[in-house]
Amino acid sequence: MKLFQCSNCKNPVYFENTTCEKCGNNLGYLNAIEGIVSFPADQKTVITPTKEKTALTYCANRQYNACNWLVATESPTPFCEACSTNRTIPDLSIPENKLDWQKIETAKHRLFYALHKLKLPTKFIINKQPLNLTFDFLAPDPSNPSAIKTGHANGLITLNIQEANAAHREYIKEQLSERYRTLLGHFRHEVGHFYWEVLIQPNAKNLEEFRALFGDDTQDYGQALEAHYKNGAPENWRESYISSYATMHAWEDWAETWAHYLHLMDMLETSYSFGLSLDPEISKVRNLEVACDFDPYEEKDFQKIIKHYLPLTYALNSLNRSMGHQDAYPFVLSPPVIEKLTFIHKVVRL
């Protein structure tokens, strides 16, 4: 993600900030300009810093501290682009639900930032039928907490809001022997299923290349899921897959790889925004000497992206270990996985 500043005092701020700690102004994110707009705290509206001079106000979910995006005051909906995709949210009169939902929206808005950067719409017409990205955020019944499963079906992404609870998420991570589990990771994975339906399935050429790389998507999903949880992943899965779960079915391989594509693009843009470069103090290891001096969202050559990304993950993991944390990026990108990522980069840019 790029870096942001208060447009009034130029103080560095985060993507999620609603107030500038230096000048006290309100802060709102305007997706159209990919920037933060600052305005006096006693104002309810602000004029866009563009030629159109549109009057803006906060998304309606600002009242719940769940969104800081700005929308036109004359918009037919009071919700921003990200919030307008919500079909169901939990009962906010329950404090725990509200807190979980706020965390969920924070992650989802970061997802929408990336989709905007990749110029990926969220509404399509496929075979003359609408296919729109929508979300159900559901609170489980205490008597049956596992009844709600996170997943995707026909554009609708369902998320058990317990995934916003760090203790619950860590418990599931240990139960499933996962190396990585985050809210943002969930969104990136599940949205991958949505974009498979719009970028791959309807396109014969893309589908043929997909099957050559990821496998047979016509395999019975239920049987594949049962076999995966019964037998686990093959011992040599790291040679061809980004995760053990990716071995379960071609759809999951795509979704897992798609999520990692969004990971690396976001991390590289952040590195580019900070002007990061690596010149490690060890004996001549040329492949660790890189300067993140380009915007990955504008780069056609995926090999250049990978060349810069791999040293970055080594540096990131080293920093985490210095703080006594586990690796932030505990994955190995084998040549077959890089080939899959390259395909995704090509399809996204078509």
Image (cartoon, rainbow, N blue to C red):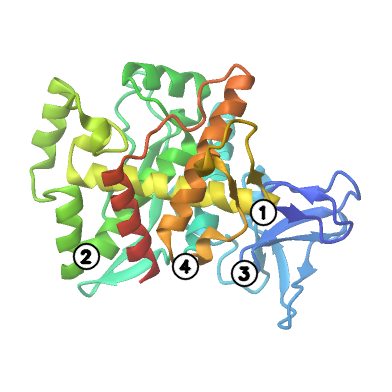
The single residue placed furthest to the bottom in the displayed view is 51
Callout 1: helix, strand or loop?
A: helix
Q: Residue at x 22, y 47 (%)?
A: 251
- Res 283 visible: yes
Q: Would residue 302 appear left or right of 34 to someone viewing this image?
A: left
Q: Quadrant of the C terminus?
A: bottom left
Residue 279 image position (x, y, % from top left): 64, 41
Residue type pointed to by label 2: Asn
User: Does label 2 or label 3 sit earlier along the sequence?
Assistant: 3
Q: Which of the two marks, 2 or 3, is nearer to us in this view?
A: 2
Q: Which residue is labeled 4 in the image?
A: 119
* Nearer to me, 212 or 336: 336
Q: Which residue is labeled 1 in the image?
A: 273
User: Does label 3 or label 4 sit earlier along the sequence?
Assistant: 3
Residue type pointed to by label 1: Ser
Within 10 Å of disc 1 (Cα), the crowding (few <14, some 14-19, many 20+) is some
Contact between labelled residues 1 and 4, with CB atoms less than 8 Å apart: no
Q: Would residue 190 appear left or right of 305 to someone viewing this image?
A: left
Q: Which residue is labeled 2 in the image?
A: 206
Callout 2: helix, strand or loop?
A: helix
User: Does label 3 or label 1 sit earlier along the sequence?
Assistant: 3
Q: Which of the two marks, 3 or 1, is nearer to us in this view?
A: 1
* Nearer to me, 263 or 20: 263
Q: Would residue 153 appear left or right of 329 to someone viewing this image?
A: left
* Marks 2 and 4, how far apart at CA: 18 Å
* Nearer to me, 287 or 22: 287
